[in-house]
Structures are given as structure tokens and as C-alpha cells.
Image (cartoon, grey):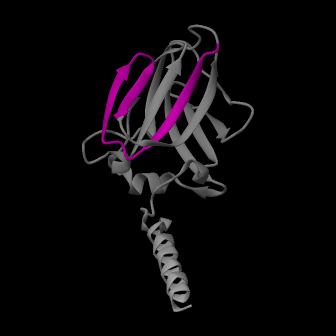
């Protein structure tokens, strides 16, 4: 009987130790998961006219916002991340060394430059990509032109260089958020 009581006590202790060791409390407070971002907003300002259009991507939505761009024009774009009504962009800036944006302009010819200030420039010199300038060569350069925007967390290395239609690349890391925007004229 005493052996059975000891066995139950040992089993209880093991389960308690296992439960505590698997706690998510040890994770970084600034880690944004896909579930923590509900909306990705792009504020697209026409550099010539100063007019700004807002494109709001809602995570898990059945439709994608359609960004209207004119060939031969340039646009300054600010990316903003929300969780409900809470602006998560500051959290990204506070952990700027752990974040990086990838811009994949599929079936469009658009050049991208990163214009982040010190608040969103990583210690390795790479700019996160919260502020960019898009120079449109040809908005529609094939069927279904679109932008796939990906926020990467905790990559071991990042590069701002263009690779095919994508601006930026990473080694390692995981996706914090991803948005798809249609592109039209």
C-alpha cells in the first residue's frame, strides 16, 4: 500500500515538473505570433500628389485589398500592424533586431527602397522595412499581380537585396504575419 502511495506521489511530482517546464512564460514578451496580428495596414502615399490611400489586410479574410498603382510613379509606403485596436508596430520597433519584412511583388515590376529611420533599423544595419519607397515600372506585368508581405521573426541573418521578385531574404526565423494584396492600375 505504501508503494502505491509513493508511486502516486512521484507521478504527481513528475507531472507538476513537466507542466512547469513546458510553460510559455519563459518566452520573450515581445514575440508576436500570427494570432497576435489581426490587421496589416499599408498607407500608400503618391510622392507626386501627396495623396495617401490606406489598404487594410485582415488576417484570414477571404478577400485581398487591391492596391492601385500607376506605372512610372513612386510611392512612399508605411506598414502598420494591429491586434484588434492595439497598434503592434511599436512592439516590432522595440524588438527591431528580431524582425524583418519581405516584399514579394509577383507579376509586377516594382523597385523597392527601405527608408526606415533609426527606430526601425536593426543593429546589423538592415532596415526592417516599415517605411519603403516603391518605384513602379509596370504594376501589371502578368496575370494576378500581387504583393505578398511577410513579417519574419528571429531570423539568424537578413538581407535587403532583391532576389527575383522578392525584396529581402532571411536565413531561419519564423513567420509572425503574412498578407496578400492584389495590385492594379
Point 41% across, 25% down: residue: 167
Q: Which image quarter is the C terminus in? A: top right
Q: Does residue 156 show up magenta in the picture?
A: yes
Q: Is residue 61 left or right of residue 80?
A: right
Q: Residue furthest bottom?
A: 2
Farthest residue, direction top: 142
Q: Can residue 74 be seen in this snapshot?
A: no
What is the quadrant of residue 132 in the picture?
A: top left
- The reply, left or right, for residue 43 in relation to residue 157 is right
Q: Is residue 143 above or below residue 181?
A: above
Instruction: Residue at 47%, 70% (x, y): give it.
Output: 18
Give the extent of the magenta segment: 144-170
Q: Main secondary structure of the magenta part?
A: strand
Q: Quadrant of the N terminus?
A: bottom right
Image: 90 above or below 102 = below
Q: Residue furthest front?
A: 1
Count all numbered tags in the image, as a single digit: 0
Name the one closer to the observer, 151 or 90.
151
Amino acid at each position: 500500500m505504501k508503494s502505491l502511495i509513493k508511486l502516486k506521489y512521484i507521478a504527481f511530482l513528475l507531472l507538476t515538473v513537466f507542466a512547469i517546464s513546458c510553460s510559455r512564460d519563459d518566452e520573450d514578451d515581445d514575440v508576436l505570433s500570427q494570432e497576435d496580428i489581426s490587421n496589416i495596414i499599408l498607407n500608400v502615399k503618391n510622392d507626386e500628389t501627396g495623396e495617401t490611400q490606406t489598404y487594410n489586410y485582415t488576417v484570414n479574410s477571404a478577400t485581398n485589398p487591391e492596391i492601385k498603382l500607376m506605372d512610372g510613379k513612386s510611392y512612399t509606403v508605411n506598414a502598420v500592424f494591429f491586434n484588434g485596436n492595439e497598434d503592434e508596430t511599436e512592439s516590432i520597433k522595440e524588438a527591431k533586431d528580431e524582425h524583418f519584412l519581405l516584399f514579394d511583388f509577383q507579376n509586377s515590376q516594382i523597385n523597392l527602397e527601405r527608408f526606415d529611420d533609426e527606430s526601425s533599423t536593426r543593429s546589423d544595419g538592415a532596415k526592417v522595412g516599415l517605411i519603403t519607397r516603391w518605384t513602379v515600372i509596370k504594376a501589371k506585368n502578368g496575370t494576378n499581380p500581387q504583393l505578398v508581405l511577410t513579417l519574419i521573426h528571429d531570423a539568424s541573418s537578413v538581407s535587403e537585396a532583391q532576389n527575383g521578385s522578392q525584396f529581402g531574404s532571411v536565413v531561419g526565423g519564423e513567420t509572425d504575419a503574412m498578407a496578400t494584396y492584389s495590385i492594379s492600375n
